[in-house]
Amino acid sequence: KNEVEQSPQNLTAQEGEFITINCSYSVGISALHWLQQHPGGGIVSLFMLSSGKKKHGRLIATINIQEKHSSLHITASHPRDSAVYICAATTSGSARQLTFGSGTQLTVLP
Amino acid sequence: DTGVSQDPRHKITKRGQNVTFRCDPISEHNRLYWYRQTLGQGPEFLTYFQNEAQLEKSRLLSDRFSAERPKGSFSTLEIQRTEQGDSAMYLCASSLGWGELEKLFFGSGTQLSVL
């Protein structure tokens, strides 16, 4: 079992839909990252959070430390949101090591 | 463009050859990471530098792999005697800050194909 698991693996939505991607982890963490990867490999860091909720534009990330669960929400989705979304955990007791989930491929259709 | 650049973007090599990749992080970033990503998987941590010091190495990093960051700026990752299993995307990331203030910036990666 992976230490960081994401669901779903693939998600297709219509433009305008509200999207949720989930991330569960089984290890103690000091922080959790949400990353966006576009075709061609470029990865952009969207959020880093260790508690509560963060919002940036149409993106919202939440984390529940007790339940070891985080969600990434996209409101009013758009085709340009199509990408792979990856959650990654910085594990407690390990200086800077990130454990990545396998990613969620999101396709938003016009 | 995140400000982290990697060179080359693509590398095709024959099994047994040595290859070297370069990463130029954002200039003021003191932390630099190398990751490896295979098709359909999330990236896997390889190694981490704080300034010029290599502080952590993954068990994935066999003796054929070596990384340097000689002046705390750019970094190189060398793979000796490449094997077909080394074929992957090699990603570099840099960061500044601590705790929740740390934000990672990734390069576009070097895609290695070992024939």
Image (cartoon, coloured by chain):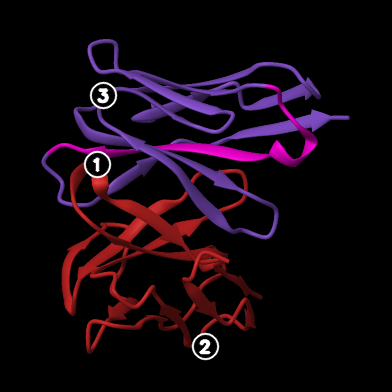
| Whole-percent x, y for residue A61 in the image | 44, 26
Residue B77 lies left or right of residue A76; in this view the side is left
Q: Say which residue label 3 marks.
A: A51
Nearer the observer, disc 2 or disc 3? 3
Task: Give the quadrant of the C terminus of chain B.
Answer: bottom right
| Whole-percent x, y for residue B53 in the image | 14, 75
Please name the amino acid that badge 2 sits on. Answer: Gln
Q: Is residue A48 magenta?
A: no
Same-subunit check for callouts 3 and 1: no
Using the image as rendered, state which of residue B99 and residue B74 is in the foreground. B99
Alpha-carbon distance for marks 3 and 1?
A: 10 Å
Q: Residue at x 23, y 82 (%)?
A: B72
Using the image as rendered, state which of residue A9 and residue B97 is in the foreground. B97
Q: Say which residue label 1 marks.
A: B100
Chain represented in red:
B
Q: Chain of mark 1?
A: B
Q: Residue at x 24, y 41 (%)?
A: B100
Task: Give the quadrant of the N terminus of chain B.
Answer: bottom right
Q: Is residue A89 magenta?
A: yes
Q: Secondary structure at mark 2?
A: loop
Q: Secondary structure at mark 3?
A: loop
Please name the amino acid that badge 3 sits on. Answer: Ser
Nearer the observer, disc 1 or disc 2? 1
Q: Say which residue label 2 marks.
A: B17
Alpha-carbon distance for marks 1 and 2?
A: 41 Å
Where A68 sits versus A6, above or below? above
Colour of chain A in the rendered structure image:
purple
Please name the amino acid that badge 1 sits on. Answer: Glu
Mark 1 vs 2, N-terminal side: 2
Q: Which residues are magenta?
A: A76-92
Q: Residues within 10 Å of mark 3 (few under 14, many from 20)?
A: some
